[in-house]
Image: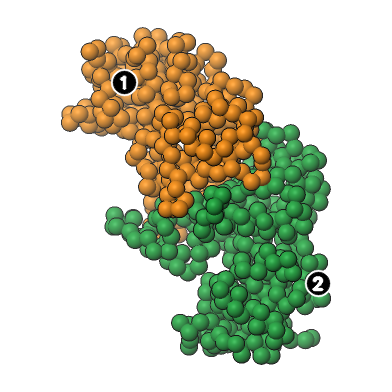
Chain colours: A green, B orange
Amino acid sequence: MKKYTVAVVGATGVVGREMIQVLESRNFPVGTLVPLASERSAGAEVEFHGKHIEVKVLNKDSFDGVDIALFSAGGSVSAEFAPIAAKSGAVAIDNTSHFRMFPDVPLVVPEVNAHAIKGHKGIISNPNCSTAQMVLVLKPFHDAGIIERVVVSTYQSVSGAGKEGMNELESQSRKTLSGMEIECKKFPHPIAFNLIPQIDSFLENGYTKEEVKMIEETKKILGDPSIQVTATTVRVPVFVGHSESINIQTKRKLSVAQVRELLSVMPGVEVMDDPSKLIYPTPRETAGRDEVFVGRIREDLSHPRAIDLWCVSDNLRKGAALNAVQIAEAWMQG
Amino acid sequence: MKKYTVAVVGATGVVGREMIQVLESRNFPVGTLVPLASERSAGAEVEFHGKHIEVKVLNKDSFDGVDIALFSAGGSVSAEFAPIAAKSGAVAIDNTSHFRMFPDVPLVVPEVNAHAIKGHKGIISNPNCSTAQMVLVLKPFHDAGIIERVVVSTYQSVSGAGKEGMNELESQSRKTLSGMEIECKKFPHPIAFNLIPQIDSFLENGYTKEEVKMIEETKKILGDPSIQVTATTVRVPVFVGHSESINIQTKRKLSVAQVRELLSVMPGVEVMDDPSKLIYPTPRETAGRDEVFVGRIREDLSHPRAIDLWCVSDNLRKGAALNAVQIAEAWMQG
């Protein structure tokens, strides 16, 4: 079996480490792992299949001999280095938002649109974490009922903002419980025992970039620019796992039983929905899992053709590292 | 000036204590305060205008000579004792859900439908906390644009579940940060660093009672059964303050500028919305305030006549104690 030389750019970050873990746990055919990071992480090590591998400083020659380069080190790093990786013959799979809406860059959730990989020109984009889990849930609605409109409100964990976000929640929580003053460094407002209705920066129209990512990326991945989406994205004091309250309005009425059936056969989705036993997904209880979990499925009392549901997924997995590795797997299979 | 004998049933609970504080801070004309509670709280004291007053055990004779009885001790207590209070000549203002949908019981948010008080027959209901703050925001939309449909997702603090809810968040948070096992007593799942997409119990149609309260009570308070509402209510690890992501679709298109103008003159509402300065309401930063705060106001990109916004309010104030006292004030003024 062919083995691949795989570079991970941003190897010491929360998502980078998760990528390496996912490559290992899925037994991805890695011949050589090349962990890359900025000078700040020079000398650090990562563990892979029991071996310690030194993290190298990213530079223009880093991609010589690399087959697959997984990027998760920020938009500007991808903007500069993903084209270099592609030029040197690697396929660059980019977890940042930089290339996602470029017309010649496929934006892929393999269970939904693996076919789009074929058109790639060296760079394939991984969607925004909150989009990835949502499109998996929307796909069966799209196929069976034709989606007219989606109204989504998110509950996103601090790990979406990396290690610093997780550290800030932890330190602010400790200080609050001890009655001490807290400091805000990573987030613009306190996040401990609080909510911040802002993720990423604001645009002229009052939406945040995170919200517009959910709107635009959903249309691109499902391949239907007519799907109407509105989103309100909110940071919540949870370490890992993004949750979403989604209202889905379709052209053709779908019953709860149909939706349940469709979602239960959808790859990557697990229905976890039994109100009589108080069963529904929560982020703390599903963190570390690969699936996108769906519960609270019900017919919307306010509309003749709409469904309300609650969806939870580990944002570091399906929202980032897992999906990137799945793209690599789909690419490998040609 | 006439002074009133005011009973507070459930005087030692989170809302009961807040009621007494609000009566004091608003200089409500209390001649005699009668704090009442169950036998478990016998011998406890409350403080009112610098005096310590002994809490008495609630019984059938507790309302002799009482003018106003504020109830917040659970539905079954109200079911039994509010009619007794009314029969003995008091007006009972009930914070539980028990009487809210009774046709002959007014359900009142004074800024919205103070006129409904006139028809009371001894009992006036205070709405559910998440409904109270929402209808204040919906009122100007209802008046100016005629509301067609509302899609709301809530982010509700643990104080909505009383002292036990607050204690559970605190103790689970401490234990989680120390790497200790946690126990779930008040909530069916962990609440520390987690979300629970269930408030109150489940109904046959998959909604929770909390969600149906938001649907039904909104129609009753705004006096328009044609308003379509769907709600997903979620408990979040915040101590005080409920937040709501609300999508409001109107018959007549309202611009953001119009909405901002309408909300800024709405009594009880404060617009806190300046994305350029990262200003929007958060629960931690607005707890202890009386107003319902609104931010993130924007035209919904998915619909030609809809507005998205974010609304935060101290659930113990406008959602409970403050609104109850405001009902008493409106009743007093006849």
Residue at image position (78%, 67%) is A116
On residue A211, the disc is: none
The residue positioned farthest toward the left in the image shown: B50
Using the image, determine if residue A21 lies above or below residue B81: below
In the rendered image, the quadrant that contains the C terminus of chain B is: top left
* Residue A15 picture quarter: bottom right
Asked if residue A317 can be seen in this view, the reply is no
Using the image, determine if residue A264 lies above or below residue B38: below
Q: Nearer the viewer, residue B228 or B232?
A: B228
Q: Nearer the viewer, residue B18 or B65?
A: B18
Residue at image position (62%, 58%) is A213
In the picture, measured across the screen, residue B205 lies left or right of residue B178, that is right
Residue at image position (60%, 87%) is A60
| Residue B93, x across and y down, in percent | 40, 20
| Residue B181, x across and y down, in percent | 45, 59
Task: Kindly identify the amino acid type of the residue bearing the numbered disc 1.
Answer: Ala
| Residue A17, x across and y down, in percent | 56, 75
Q: What is the distance, in whole Å, between disc 2 and disc 1 at their CAs?
A: 73 Å
Using the image, determine if residue B325 lies above or below residue A226: above
The residue singled out by tag 1 in the image is B7
Label 2 residue SS = helix
Question: Which of pointers 2 and 1 indicates the residue nearer the eye?
Answer: 2
The residue singled out by tag 2 in the image is A118
Residue at image position (52%, 55%) is A202
Please rate how many residues cluster around mark 1, counting C-alpha atoms within 10 Å: few if below 14, some from 14 to 19, many from 20: many
* Residue A308 picture quarter: top right
In the picture, measured across the screen, residue B157 lies left or right of residue B18, that is right
